[in-house]
Image (tube, grey):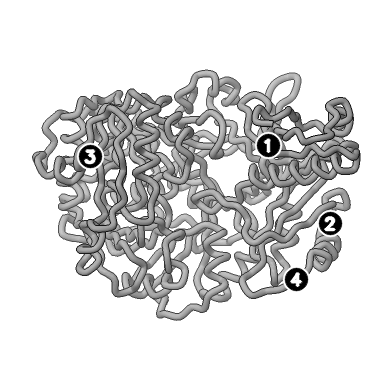
Amino acid sequence: MNFSSVEQRDAIEQEMAWDARDLPVTVYQAMQRTAGTHGARPAVSFQLFSGPKDPAETLTWTDLRAKTAQAANLFRSLGVGENDVVAYLLPNANETVLALLGGMTAGIVNPINPLLDVEHIAGILRETNAKVLVTLKAFPKTDVPQKAAEAVALAPNVKTVLEVDLLRYLTPPKSWIVPLVRPKNPVSHKATVKSFMAELAKQPTELTFEESNADRVGAYFHTGGTTGVPKVVQHKQSGMVYNGWLGDTLLFDAESTVMCPLPLFHVFACHPVLMSMIASGAHVVFPTPAGYRGDGVFDNLWKLVERWQATFLIGVPTAFSALMQRPVDADISSIKQVFSGSAPLPVELYKRFEKAAGVEVIEGYGLSEATCLVSCNPIGGVKKIGSVGIAFPYTEVKILTATPDGPQECGVNEIGEICISNPGVYSGNTYTQDEKNADLFHHNRFLRTGDLGRVDEDGYLWITGRAKDLIIRGGHNIDPAEIEEALAGHPAVAMAGAIGQPDAHAGELPCVYVELVAGASATEAELMEYAAEHIHERAAVPKHLEIIPEIPKTAVGKVFKPDLRRSAITRVYNAALEEAGQAARVAHVVEDKKLGLVAHLSRREGSDEAAVAQALGDFTRPWEWSSNS
């Protein structure tokens, strides 16, 4: 079906009520349908290395369905029921796909980001009460097995660890060398350790249990930063089927091949991509365990597109920024569209990419709390650069603002909080923790996203900022996107991250950190002058601009602003202490689950506690003496 205008979206909705559609209840049922229709066609491909001629393993739809059944049977044999959890701590591989699909078929699957620290991983395992963890067997150049062992020691609820050995993807001589240099991974926990693939092979290729035909929670995804208490989002089977239906109905077919260098612990790769493959019979390629972070992926990506004749490329703004620093050195004429998600795509980067690659970029919007998809630029229709397009069929977006009389809907182009309702929103039970669901919905139906935005006269959604990211300067609200967008227009700027730095007078002042394009040169004074000329709101002109080697990013390419805030707090507080003649300095800035970021000070000879308190007393960000000082 076409999705090039609001009118066509409305026509799709009017055709039939969502609940009346003949759709599978579960993801496994959807896979059975596809295997029956497209069994011999490729489903999932994975290559360990990024070279365009490196070996790869492809599973057909017949293979994927059979192996998913084996994985589900294995998890059931380990005591996993419908309400029990299978977690995985894995980079991308075909085994990761099997853990994901088998886990949600047998029970509830819980993907975990391997880049998190041990304490956070353990916190997620305890919060979800996972019975089984699928992770890596010790392998060169990865710390995932060690992290997993340490985390399981802190999460006694995990009874079984299933190990994935990447050795099977290697060929001689590398396959001979790895066993000789494989690092030792001392088991420091009480869970039983088994080989995932060896145990999988023992299982029948048809389900040994009757899958429930009722909708239920099938996945837990953690969200938020890499510090503090984890928030865990619940995804129902119906929400995952809805995401797949959107891809099948509006975009992909069995002839499509999708290049997806995004991690399979993030909703973007799992739901809009993999669930759409399951619904449509399309083919997805995962290059290297680390995706875009893998060795040589950026240098080889255009060649990989040519190798696999990819028709669609999935990415995030930081990936597109990196690709723009490399020539298009292959035949990429097979690509129909490029999709950008996870974070707003700067307008200048959007224009630069479309010009260099000669391909249409479709920007979308989604969030873990809605199982993912919310809106995207109309495909083949009018694109308004800077917007995230129009809401998908059966997705209702309202811009609401809190008033003393309750939530009120904003008018056209009025900014408020983006609130959504669709089949991916689990009303009232978004998070596993009840206390985190408090005040999360308006009218008990519309999920409060925490994103600020507006809907224009044509029904296009514009994200104007993040409520919690607002820079509040003396009561004046500043949208950091205004600063970031302005600097993104400078040819030497690859990425910019704007935050509010502490100020004793105004509370916060705008501050921006900049990463330069590789090989480019620019001074901080030059960029500051550029910012002053291109930022229209005087109060938003940054008071501090700093060029750093690399902007900190999350695993899916978003600017990781907590690290920038830590840097700013450290710099500002240390300057205040120095000005006051105090030797004490900020040792580190930590996340407190009640107070937020807290500066920990180290005592040094000659520090006067009263003078230190006076020097920092006018700042709103809390501080305390480090226990190690």
Element type at mark 2: loop
Q: Which residue is mark 1?
A: 468
Decide which of tag 2 and tag 4 comes sooner along the chain: 4
Please identify the residue farthest to the front as the structure is shown: 605
Q: Which residue is mark 2?
A: 536
Disc 3 residue crowd, few under 14, some 14–19, many 20+, Cα 10 Å: some
Q: Amino acid at mark 4?
A: Ala
Which dot, 3 or 2, sits closer to the camera?
Answer: 2
Which dot, 4 or 1, sits closer to the camera?
Answer: 4
- Foreground of the two, 591 or 113: 591
- Foreground of the two, 124 or 185: 185
Q: Residue at x 60, y 22 (%)?
A: 439
Disc 1 residue crowd, few under 14, some 14–19, many 20+, Cα 10 Å: few
- Say which mark, if any, is on residue 547: none
The answer to whether 265 is drawn above or below residue 94 in the figure is: above
**Residue at mark 4 to residue at mark 1: CA–CA distance:** 31 Å
Which dot, 1 or 2, sits closer to the camera?
Answer: 1
**Residue at mark 3 to residue at mark 4: CA–CA distance:** 56 Å
Q: Amino acid at mark 2?
A: His
Percent of width and height locating residue 544:
81, 53
Which dot, 1 or 3, sits closer to the camera?
Answer: 1
Q: Answer whether labels 3 and 2 touch (C-beta < 8 Å).
A: no
Decide which of tag 1 and tag 3 comes sooner along the chain: 3
Q: Amino acid at mark 3?
A: Gln
Q: Residue at x 77, y 36 (%)?
A: 604
In this rendering, does residue 237 appear at all? no
**Residue at mark 1 to residue at mark 3: CA–CA distance:** 40 Å
